[in-house]
Amino acid sequence: MATDLARNLRLLCSYTPSISQVCRDLGINRQQFTKYLNASARPSDRNLRRICDYFGVAIDEIMMPHGQFASIVAVTPKTQNMVRALGPAAPALNAMIESSERALERYRGYYFYYYYTPSRPGCIRRSLLRLHERNGIWYSRLTERIQSEASPMGRSHYSHYLGIALFLGDRITIVDYNASNQTSLSQTLLYPAQGRELKFLSGLTLGVQGRSARAPFTARLFLEYLGEAPKRREMLEQTGVFTADDPGLPPYVRRVISARELEHSDILKAYELLP
């Protein structure tokens, strides 16, 4: 486990400008940090929490076997064969990525991600979404907590969805996949923020129901901005599935994501939040 921790930490550091920069940001002595990287010492619980908060991962994730951790964290560059397979679409995709880089900067950070879940009719799921940029490309990471009563093993655990974010036609588009099984793609479409201050976003999600049903579904979304560096562990503890009248949910969430009017309509459209 100590070796996995060291390898996972080295992988995280590979995405940073330098190890020295990481040490300065964390306020950890470089010599001591090198011992963590070499597996000759284990971080204290306090330092481990600081490291995880800095890199945006959970403690239980950084302790995973290295191969499993790498599949969750790393979004590897496409191979030359993939670029060739895209053919004429490659320049267009590159142009979309480049045009999105600056536009998405104001959306950097973490969000609570609310929607009515098809797995528990009438209940609202609150997940944690992160938008971050690396080498000019914007990535998404959605973390959902599967509570013990909904788990076949009777244990609470997390599911992770990794994706890419684009800003196209004055809309935010996210396409992601389940990191553990790669059995489907999901799409999120959001209105941009209104006004100067980023507080909330609204839109739609299109995906496939979990468990054995595997039914395609769409639902209205409400995103609540949490800032660039919230206490991630505390935020994750607030995620899960809740009854619609749970007092722990903001009352306005239900109004934005409800679809009760569909009995009089054939189209589900997102509510646009106005300033």
Image (tube, rainbow, N blue to C red):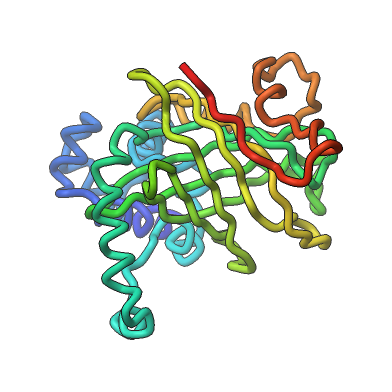
- Can residue 84 be seen? yes
The residue lying toward the viewer, choosing from 63 and 233, is 233
Residue 75 position within the rendered picture, expressed as x and y whole percent measured from the top left: 39, 61
Question: Image point 70% across, 58% down: which residue?
Answer: 208
Query: Residue 9 vs residue 213: left or right?
Result: left
User: Which residue is at 40% across, 39% downward?
Assistant: 52
Image position of 63 (left or right of 215): left
Q: Is residue 42 above or below residue 126?
A: below
Check the image and report above or below for 149 versus 7: above
On the image, the x and y values in percent for residue 176 come to: 52, 56
Q: Could you say which is closer to the camera, residue 197 or residue 262?
A: 262
Picture residue at 61% right of the left edge, 29% below the top:
237
Looking at the picture, tell me which residue is in the foreground, 33 or 87. 87
Q: Is residue 235 shown to the viewer in this render? A: no
Percent position of residue 168, x then y: 38, 49
Question: Residue at coordinates 47% horizontally, 63% vertically from top-left?
Answer: 71
Q: Is residue 267 left or right of residue 180?
A: right
Tell me: residue 183, above or below residue 9: below
Quadrant position of residue 29: top left
Quarter of the image for residue 257 reads top right
Q: Position of residue 271 (x, y in %)?
A: 60, 31
